[in-house]
Image: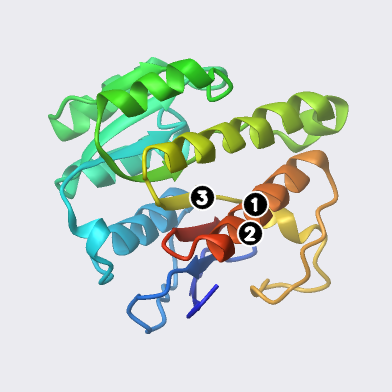
Amino acid sequence: LGDVYKRQLWLTVPVVHAVSTWAIGDILPHSFEYGYGTGYIATSLLVRYSLGEHRHQNWRKQMAILITGGAGYIGSHTCVEMLEDGREIVVVDNFSNSSPVALDRVEQITGKEVRFHQVDLLDEDALREVFRSYSFEAVIHFAALKAVGESVSMPLTYYKNNVSGSLILFEVMQEHHVKNIVFSSSATVYGDPSSVPITEDFPIQPTNPYGWTKAMMEQILIDLQRAKPDWNVILLRY
């Protein structure tokens, strides 16, 4: 993956810490550590750091950032952080496990309009229309089904939604020359770790279909970045 720098952001919720894997060739090589926080704070800080403070020229352009699953809990908080940081954002969400009310509250908090489209990532034509309508500099990809227990009883639904939907997203990004992505993965990819806290060199060994979908999507992005080094990929586990 070229020069890969790993940063850890420690959390008190839950008992393990959030880990991000940064796969960017030209990034400031210093570690990044906090003593407390929550999942959405971790995500927001890491995303803002990746979008605003590294030295890759393409990320300096003031274009829009596409946030998939932006009406979810972490997604909506990230929308707030992006808007308050002066970023232009566009949200796509199918509202299968979220509500448009969350985006209304984002607008109330920030005083700024949220541009959103009710789109399922499996709807390739609708997603392409969104990409044709805006100029995106990056994608923050939260959209996914996320209940571990449900994934065990509905594995095909999870693999189709999470993996197939992501593949469509990555293909449409490639068609429109959008090569910067922050992928919301999960510490679930570590399965049942032998000890805590978890570090990034722990083995990837998911124990349920949800975890496997995240691990598969990570591997797809790793392979994509290896094949196309001009892609900037961040894998955020928390």
User: Looking at the image, is mark 1 or mark 3 earlier in the sequence?
Assistant: 3
Please state which of residues 172 and 103 is positioned toward the viewer in this rendering. 172
- Establish if 179 lies above or below 112: below
Distance, label 1 to label 3, CA atoms, is 11 Å
What element does badge 1 sit on? helix
Distance, label 2 to label 1, CA atoms, is 5 Å
Percent across and percent down for residue 97 are 56, 21
Residue at (37, 38) in percent of width and height: 176
Question: Across the whole image, how many numbered discs are drawn on residues?
Answer: 3
Single out the residue that lies furthest toward the bottom. Answer: 30
User: Are discs 2 and 1 less than 8 Å apart at CB?
Assistant: yes
Residue carrying label 2: 223
| Amino acid tagged 1 | Ile
- Establish if 4 lies above or below 213: below
What element does badge 3 sit on? strand
User: Looking at the image, is mark 2 or mark 3 earlier in the sequence?
Assistant: 3
The image quadrant where one finds the C terminus is bottom right
Dot 3 alpha-carbon crowd within 10 angstroms: few under 14, some 14 to 19, many 20 or more: many
Indicate the quadrant where residue 168 lies: top right
Residue at (40, 32) in percent of width and height: 70
Residue carrying label 3: 183
Residue at (20, 32) in percent of width and height: 109
Q: Is residue 82 left or right of 13 when viewed as pictured?
A: left
| Amino acid tagged 2 | Asp
Residue carrying label 1: 220
Q: Is residue 30 left or right of 237 when viewed as pictured?
A: left
Percent across and percent down for residue 53 are 24, 68
Instruction: Say whether residue 140 is visible.
Output: yes
| Amino acid tagged 3 | Phe
